Amino acid sequence: MRTDSLARQLAFLAEIDRLKGVLRQTTLIDQSRRENSAEHSWHLALAALVLAEHAPQGADVGRVVRMVLVHDLVEIDAGDAFAYDAAANVGKDERERLAAERLFGLLPPDQGAELRALWEEFERADTPDAAFAVALDRLQPLLVNHHGGGGSWTRHGITRAQVLARMAPIERALPSLWAEVLRMVDENCRKGHIRP
Amino acid sequence: MRTDSLARQLAFLAEIDRLKGVLRQTTLIDQSRRENSAEHSWHLALAALVLAEHAPQGADVGRVVRMVLVHDLVEIDAGDAFAYDAAANVGKDERERLAAERLFGLLPPDQGAELRALWEEFERADTPDAAFAVALDRLQPLLVNHHGGGGSWTRHGITRAQVLARMAPIERALPSLWAEVLRMVDENCRKGHIRP
């Protein structure tokens, strides 16, 4: 039993290596290449630790770290759908559900259920922990685009209204960051990185 | 004060994006490219969560996750020294100390001190948390090389004795995994991926 459990854990850890090959629309700040979902998840986990003092009341930062570490795993099967591409998001829920079934199913049942529940909570975004995690998932590409010359905003001709709609979870979950978010967005509008 | 603190936190989060550009000798399992230290750190954090039941007595898994998330940050300035390359490891301690000074110094002082202490504990490897973290840092490239056709072992002509010496922290901190480690090493010897 113990042996079977260990074998499943190691098989899961080998399988999730593939998240390093899932490319996002965001680039690195140095714009040398597109970012992948594994390093993006690492960046979110550090953002959760560093910005913990701004978290919504009742948020458990350790749990948020676990949540962001697994929040994109389903992309191994379902791919990353660019947030501003409506067509790419059609059928996404069903693709991700099947992916969750397969990937979390590699683990011993209790562990798989626990990590899957964290992913589902992230998707529902209806708890303080998930609200914090979703806000970080919006903030990280904003930071990267801001320091990376406009990045995916510029490349895809995204407008200020689109960016602000996308960033709304930050205003709700991390209100103490909102003035700084607006400052970054406005600076990128002035520079022509975000369309008016 | 709050604003200055937030500015420092965001500056730190932007700076550590560079860890995604620090390449290790290990490749991805699909051997498409070398692994970087940010995605490697993400992989360790998930390994800590998934293998928690095997952790040394007294280990605090949440703390170990934080430790592995920051354990390679100094490589942003100091680079990644290949474990089996003695020459590359000369002067490494001093380079990493200076890197820690600069990078953790970007944060508000209390946060910087807390994360730096986690990194120092990892380097000393003298607590149950650090012993677990170091063992995971040895296990992850083993898994990747095992599933990736020998990877950096084969490319650099590494011997069985070198691999076993490198894996010794796993035997000490995760004894319930040791039989499986030996099985993987022996399989790679038989296949010619590790030299006798």
Image (cartoon, coloured by chain):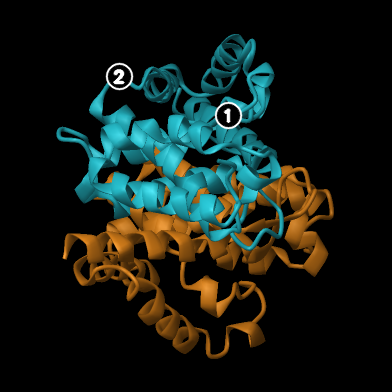
Chain colours: A orange, B cyan
Q: Quadrant of the N terminus of chain A?
A: bottom left
Which of marks 1 and 2 precedes in the sequence?
1
Is residue A72 visible in the rendered image? The answer is no
Name the element at disc 1: loop
Relative to A98, say whether B61 is above or below: above
In-front residue for pair A65/A155: A65
Relative to B98, say whether A56 is above or below: below
Q: Dot 2: within a 10 Å radius of its alpha carbon, few (fewer than 14), some, or many (20 or more) residues?
A: few
- Percent of width and height locating residue A131: 37, 60
Q: Give the amino acid at mark 1.
A: Ala
Q: Dot 1: within a 10 Å radius of its alpha carbon, few (fewer than 14), some, or many (20 or more) residues?
A: few
Dot in front, 2 or 1 = 1
- Which residue is pictured at 42% across the width and 49% down the height? A174
Q: Quadrant of the C terminus of chain A?
A: bottom right
Say which residue label 1 marks. Answer: B83
Say which residue label 2 marks. Answer: B126
- Percent of width and height locating residue A13: 42, 59
Q: Quadrant of residue A24?
A: bottom right
- Which residue is pictured at 40% across the width and 83% down the height? A97
Is residue A165 visible in the rendered image? The answer is yes
Give the CA separation, mark 2 to mark 1.
19 Å
Q: Chain of mark 1?
A: B
Q: Quadrant of residue A10?
A: bottom left
Q: Give the amino acid at mark 2.
A: Asp
- Which residue is pictured at 24% across the width and 28% down the height? B128
